[in-house]
Amino acid sequence: MNYEKIYNSLVEKAKPRGLDKSQHEGYFEIHHIVPRSLGGTNADDNLVMFTAREHFIAHMLLWKAYPQENSLFYAAMMMSNRFTDRKSRLYESMKQILAAKMSERRKGKYKDLTGQKFGKLRVIELARLQPISEDDESKGRRAIWACLCDCGNEHEVIGGSLTSGNTKSCGCLPVELGKARCGENSSMWGRKHTEETKEKFKLRRVLRGSENPMWGRTWTDEQREAASKRLKGTKWTEARRAAATFPTGEDHQFFGKSHTEETRQKISQILKDKNQRPWENLSTQTDESLTKWAMCDYYYDLWILSGKVGLKRFTKFYNETHNDSVSLAFFTNPRIKFIEGWIPQEDEEWVEFSKNYLEGGWLKQ
């Protein structure tokens, strides 16, 4: 079947509509005729206005016409999350293809970092390829690099930690920076916080507990054992012990104190706002943000298939596979909810919101 010919015919049929949605009744979406991942631009002559159904068909045809282009497959996968029955054979086959592509990306592929310098670390050689999961080697392996620090210590680091900038030394850099910022070198030397700033700090402390992704959750025995193995042999400095010790009793900042009525009302209002579903707080949501929340089922599936990686790695992976440039902030809140155990497809309120919004039947009041 000539999928490219069918696609071109669909485009030519829609071109006479123009690009002004206000001139037509019903719901329409703007589509790039030549996808941006293949060099297409945002010029008017490369845009066409499709109905939601036509838009879905167009992306399926592009994927079938150019199966070697991963970016077109990922775009088709996103569209299938919007319009395809989760129990259909098409959706099942696309999920299998997505899983296979993700698996292929993780199979021992790594960029040679030998000789490169990251912060105070210079990469000497590849130490080994370590399985991402000890229980399931099918999830792939990651490169562990042997590095030499400027201070003279040898240190092994995960490649992703070097390239992302998370690791810049053997551990000596934070100590040096801490010493350099103490005493008269501190930006707060000889200064005091204003009363307004102190009040802001107090409110932030109140919200820290429930804001933590681990709030109200406990570790399993397997997680405790894994954490114990990672930290075995790590020596605690006096500064680390002091930071990890939570003040109690008379040492606590609120010992013998109580909030004013005004402060209690502020805290109550903040907590009420926090308890709202992200898409319900309309005063703070843009159309782009609402679209993001409406597509969370796709982002959740992608996050699961990526091995539940960290924010930076997931954002980087998404941008590479979708030829996009979203920021870390784009996925911050959805990922926190995923970590907390939120599964969009099982949330009836979200399913209703997503369906109505993506089909054009949901209006921002």
Image (cartoon, helix red, strand yellow):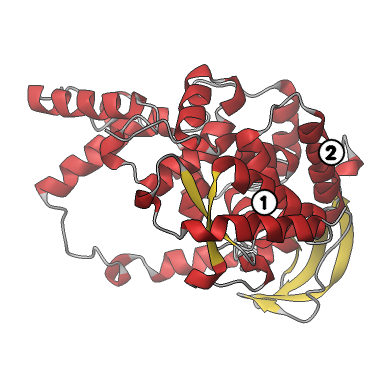
Mark 2: which amino acid?
A: Gln
- What amino acid does circle 1 point to? Ala
| Residue nearer the viewer, 280 or 189 | 280
Quarter holding residue 138: top right
Would you say 344 lies left or right of 196 here? right
Q: Is residue 315 above or below residue 53?
A: below
Residue situated in front as seen by the camera: 4 or 14: 14
Return the residue at label 1. 58
Farthest residue toward the top?
348
From the viewer's side, name the closer residue of 226 and 182: 226
Q: Nearer the viewer, residue 44 or 194?
A: 44
**Secondary-structure class at tag 1:** helix
Is residue 154 rendered to the left or right of residue 41?
A: right
Q: Which residue is mark 2?
A: 96
Q: Quadrant of the C terminus?
A: top left
The residue positioned 53% from the left and 24% from the top of the image is: 351
**Residue 246 in sight from this viewpoint:** no
Q: Residue at x 55, y 42 (%)?
A: 52
| Rendering coords of residue 253 (x, y %) | 24, 33
**Label 2: few (<14), some or many (≥20) within 10 Å?**
few
Q: Position of residue 54 (x, y in %)?
A: 61, 46
Q: Is residue 279 visible?
A: yes
Mark 1 or mark 2, earlier in chain: 1
The residue at the point 16 percent across, 23 percent down is 264
Identified at 82% across, 60% down, the residue is: 143
State the CA–CA distance, disc 1 to disc 2.
21 Å
